[in-house]
Image: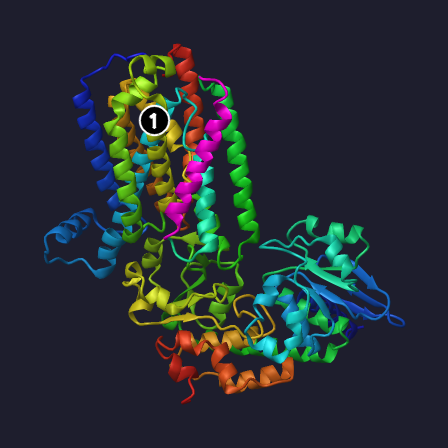
Amino acid sequence: MTERRAVFPFSLLAGLLVALTGAVALFSLAVGRFPVPVERVAWILFSALIPAEGSWNVQETSVVLLIRLPRVLGSLIAGGGLAMAGAALQGVFRNPLVGPQIIGVSSGAGFGGALAILLFDGLFAVIPLAFVFGLLAMIAVWSLGSGDREESLLSLVLGGVVISAFFTALTSLGQYVADPYNKLPAIVMWLMGSFASSSWDRLVFAVPVICCSGTLLYLVRFRINVLSLGQEEAEALGIDVARNRWFVLVCTTLITAATVALAGIVGWVGLVVPHMARMLVGSDHRKLLPVSALLGATYLTLMDDVARSLTAAEIPIGILTALAGAPLFAFLLKKRRREGGAWM
Amino acid sequence: MRRMLPNRLRVVGTGICALMFACFLISPGEGAKTVVTDQAGREVVIEGPIERIVTIPIPAASMVLAVDGSSEKLVGMNPLSKTAMEGEILSEFFPEALKIRSDIVQGEGFQPNVETLMSLAPDIVFQWGNFGDNLYTPLLNAGMKVALFKYGTQEYLEGWIETFGAILGKQEKSATILDWHRKTREQLAKRSGAIPDSEKPRTLYFLRFLANYQVAGKNTHNDVSIALAGGKNVAAEEIDGFAAVNEEQILLWDPEVILLNGFERELSPDHVYTNERLKGVSAVRNRRVYKLPLGGYRWDPPNQETPLMWMWMSAVLHPGRDKFDLAGEMERAYGLLYGRAPSRDQYDHILLMEKNRGSAHYDALFGRAK
């Protein structure tokens, strides 16, 4: 583990990032297809807390409070959660290529969600099924890769490819048998990823799950540091490796499943953002986890601003994060290698 | 010489018109040989009588039933053609139609299982011609007679009806149906032309509403229909074809009338009225959200009952203007198409009186009191 020398104190950086995230959130509340003047946005927000009289109308109120606010909160929390989950997974697996998508959790959760849409009406089944299948996928990948005591990079990635392909095929099967008018559009929408249907009742489901799991991950940040040293070192330091790994895995799977339930499959955030964070604060998870969360929240919220405002038609956010994420990841990979820096 | 030129022009003009509107040229050959030029410009020759027809495009099945007035010759159809019949008027008119095989394709696609199709021994198969040649070359390789259809405009639709007339030996009936389509269209064009732009309600059609908000922009049949019925499609300027939009965009367009598709079975105007986030939209405030009826087929895409849809839409968009007597028109049209008239209960079912009753003017326009 290499400790990067900080350019300036962590507390200052953290403060700046919190301010940036807040600013992005406020900015996002002021952009969109429906023009609402900035000062009116502020008044509407203000009057939601303390009832006040104003000149805004019912449309503007619902745009700000019922459409943008849940959507911005959704993307903040999902982005933060995914980035944090990615950072934790990369630490525990000691592998920079790991993200919820690479190790099959996203595909598993995606299939679980598609199955829930196929079998049930309404959303109540989406989170539990997304979670169960996400967890199943992760267990399968792990058991495929755990031939040797030290999980090797190759077997892990290959295991992820295999399991992802399997669940993707199951999802395609679900699409194939789905009623084209009544079920299929929801599944397709789901697989492309979108915050368009964010609403307060969806947030009520997903936010507690993501916040609790995120907090739990933050509470074990020191153990993730120890786990990232490798199995033998961790055992030598008196840590129950298997149990702690499981704890982290369950937390990250919960986060992934909840974001999948909120917005469908949003790829690349959990893979790319932790790398950006690592460039800022190094790989000490005590700093890396909160910084990843803040950067992820900002990143995904800005992406969603583009998705909902650029054209009259809504752009699926999964497409945007992949289009931006893949080149960004390639760039980080190249830069890192040129600098000869270690990954972890 | 002087007189010949205009004549020749007229001949050429008629030829072009026939090509444009019919797209199909049919020449009943010697004996029982039928020659069809399909909408991809291919010539299809069928020897012997045509007794077994398979249709893969979804609205085509109900058109065969309408033109033939029976379900005897249709031996295979798209499963989604069947879901448009189940529990609806067509299965009451033609109960046997529900026994027709529909397992030749699955899901949203149009790729048939060639061997299942062969086991039906069709004399002719109707397939899409504008979704790539993968959909029909395997059928041709298997030695089947395939005629290709194209989709999206009233002109193509009229070609379908004309072809079915020729194939089924019901040219006279298909000509009458086409005549009704064209006359209604002209009549409506004249009416809506007389309506000043400022009085045309801003209208938005949702192809999907429950999973996401898919709307119809320009270059869609729905856009053409809205214009014909005297409305202004708010999505036409920014959307080409169909696209998903978000609630802010809907609020920005602020439609005065919202039309909901007939594809999503569960969908009803209440879904729109109870959506907190759309409560500022004019159509919601004035309760002018209507779900499109489902008669012999879903009224959304081009089909044999399209003129009735236009009349219905013009009444919904302009409840105050003089309008068609839809009940009477339906009785006449159903007599022509299916040889039967809908009962009062069937009429209520087709027009979705239950679902649409809570919307402005609906009961007054189409209810029993009238």
Quarter where residue A4 is shown: top left
Nearer to us in this view, B275 or A96: A96
Could you tell me if residue B240 is visible in this image? Answer: no
Q: Is residue A129 magenta?
A: yes
Figure check: B121 above or below B2: above
Q: The magenta stretch spans which residues?
A: A124-149
Q: Quadrant of the C terminus of chain A?
A: top left
Nearer to us in this view, A334 or A148: A148
What residue is rendered at 62% in x and 80% in y?
B93
Could you tell me if residue A75 is visible in this image? Answer: yes
Residue A186 in picture, x, y percent from top left: 45, 53
Quarter where residue A122 is shown: bottom left
- Relative to A321, is B141 on the left or the right? right
What residue is rendered at 37% in x and 15% in y?
A230
Figure check: A308 above or below B88: above
Q: Which residue in the rendered view is the most extreme toward the right?
A: B31
- Relative to A128, is B307 on the left or the right? right
Query: Does the magenta stretch mainly form a helix, a strand or a loop?
Result: helix
- Relative to A154, is A229 on the left or the right? left
Figure check: B173 above or below B138: below
Pointer 1: what residue? A243
Q: Quadrant of the N terminus of chain A?
A: top left
Q: Which residue in the rendered view is the most extreme toward the top?
A: A340
Q: Which residue in the rendered view is the most extreme toward the bottom?
A: B369
- Three-letter amino acid code of the residue under disc 1: Arg
Nearer to us in this view, A53 or B175: A53
Q: Is residue A78 magenta?
A: no
Q: Secondary structure at mark 1?
A: helix
